[in-house]
Amino acid sequence: MSKRAPSREPRAPREGWHGWDEYAPFYDWENARTLGRRDVAFWQRIAAEAGGEVLELGCGTGRITIPLAKHDIDVVGVDRSGPMLERAARRARQVRIPDPQSLIPAFVRADIRALPFKRGRFDMVLAPYGILQSLVRERDLADTLASVARVIKRGGTFGIDLVPDVPNWREYRNKVQLRGAAAGGRKLTLIESVRQDRRRRLTTFTQRYLERRGGRTATHAFELTFRTLTVRQMSARLERAGFSVENVLGDYRGRPWDSRADVWIILAKKG
């Protein structure tokens, strides 16, 4: 009589920040080929309305932070990844920013679940391009929303951009997603696997970069995990943290949101 194979429970997710240090050397290269989102100009418009200091959560390599500073916005970028922030600081030194003495962006290494800023410092807080989806546990999101509520001024705007298609990705293994030339004479190939944990609403991307230079090949492998909530679920959590949802948009031109939208943007006010 054959034995029944034991059921395999999905393995517990790692911390949401895992993988981003390893991703840093490839982040800009990949996004230049895949992002195709007009979010930079959108966040410039939103941040210009702040009338004061702006905080960007999960600023990474400065993809949003630096354009905001170039747009005469007083901005601080915070990220947990040291390698990401090193690249952001290097990029900031290479661009021309108006009045660099006062408006060059500040980059701070910190955990967004416990922001190291005084109460009510910021007029606006931004969470672009699904950064809150890197919070893989409910308590991580609750701690982050509470931390944002503490450092933002009363009446300040909290802007959140969610990526809704992540849970809809089909599962696959070892698929070549991208290949092409990179700086320094390198050639990169991205080989990716995707797995879904529907019960926990988690999507994990296993990424393997093959980096070829001359006759040598190096392999860089890491995982990135994202947790996706609906607009209604995220709005409820914002309200519990002391925010009121003012608007929900479905694209970067300001069109109203509906369930078919490719982008979910929530703009909330601190009560």
Image (spheres, grey):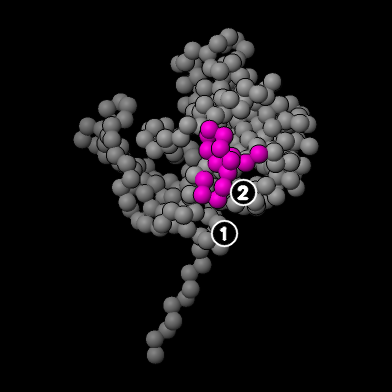
User: Is 231 drawn above or below residue 58 in the view shown?
Assistant: below
User: Is 136 drawn above or below residue 124 in the view shown?
Assistant: below
- Residue drawn 55% across and 57% down? 201
Q: In the image, 214: left or right of 28?
A: left
**Which residue was labeled with disc 1?**
200
Mark whose residue sits in front, 1 or 2? 2
How many C-alpha atoms fall within 10 Å of the one at disc 2: few (<14), some, or many (≥20)?
some
Answer yes or no: is residue 158 visible.
yes
Q: Looking at the rendering, which quadrant does residue 112 occupy?
A: top right
- Residue drawn 49% across and 44% down? 262
Kind of residue sitting beneath label 2: Val
Kind of residue sitting beneath label 1: Arg
Q: Is residue 252 magenta?
A: yes
Q: Which residues, given as a range, are shown in magenta?
A: 247-261
Q: Is residue 185 magenta?
A: no
Q: Position of residue 221 (x, y in %)?
A: 39, 45
- Please give the label number shown on residue 231: 2
Q: Nearer the viewer, residue 240 or 269?
A: 269
Q: Position of residue 31 (x, y in %)?
A: 41, 35
Q: State which quarter of the image contains the N terminus.
A: bottom left
Q: Residue furthest left?
A: 215
Secondary element at tag 1: loop
- Measure how far apart labels 1 and 2 are at the Cα level: 17 Å
Q: Earlier in the sequence, mark 1 or mark 2?
A: 1
How many C-alpha atoms fall within 10 Å of the one at disc 1: few (<14), some, or many (≥20)?
some
Q: Position of residue 196 (x, y in %)?
A: 47, 58
- Please give the label number shown on residue 99: none
- Residue drawn 21% across and 35% down? 215
Secondary element at tag 2: helix
Answer yes or no: is residue 112 visible.
no
- Residue drawn 37% across and 57% down? 172
